[in-house]
Amino acid sequence: MGRRLRMAPFLRVKEEGAPYRRFRGIHEWFGDATRGAFSDLRTEIEEIHEDGDRLVVLGRAHYRGRRSGVEVTSNAGWIVEFKDGEIVRVWSFRSHAETLEEAGLDASEIA
């Protein structure tokens, strides 16, 4: 992962809306998420679709609230953008539909 890497997760653990940058930022997000809001956080990949210089990934997110103990499982999606062989951006979304819409794809196109 190179210097250009940016990640914009839908599960925000900080108030500011700026994306996390570089490997250190991604590491910071996972640390903040598991030390702060969640006692458990896992993702499950169900489908990966190549779309030019991007991967469109559909799956599920599993998390447990640190204070409440409530477990939640929901659909999730990611768009991973590559440039010159490096991952440069990762966006995450709360649903498969939102992921496909942002990618400009129709569910019938990837079935």
Image (cartoon, rainbow, N blue to C red):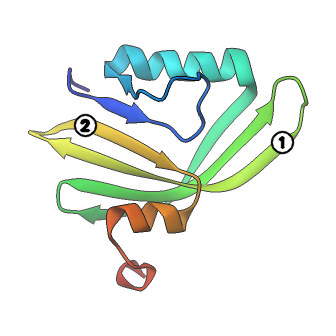
Judge whether residue 10 can be spotted in this image.
yes
Q: What kind of residue is marked 2?
A: Ile
Quadrant assignment, res 71:
top right
* Residue occupied by mark 2: 87
Crowd tier of the residue under label 1, counting other residues whose Cα lies within 10 Å: few below 14, some 14–19, many 20 or above: some
User: Residue 85 vs residue 46: left or right?
Assistant: left
Q: Quadrant of the N terminus?
A: top left
Q: Quadrant of the C terminus?
A: bottom left
Quadrant assignment, res 62:
top right
Secondary element type, mark 1: strand
What residue appears at the point 32 percent right and 30 percent down from the top-left corner? 6
Specify which label sits upstream in the sequence, 2 or 1.
1
* Residues at circles 2 and 1 in contact by the CB criterion of under 8 Å: no
Is 99 in front, or is 60?
99
Judge whether residue 47 can be spotted in this image.
no
Crowd tier of the residue under label 2, counting other residues whose Cα lies within 10 Å: few below 14, some 14–19, many 20 or above: many
Q: Position of residue 97 (x, y in %)?
A: 52, 68
* Residue occupied by mark 1: 71
What residue appears at the point 51 percent right and 23 percent down from the top-left corner? 16
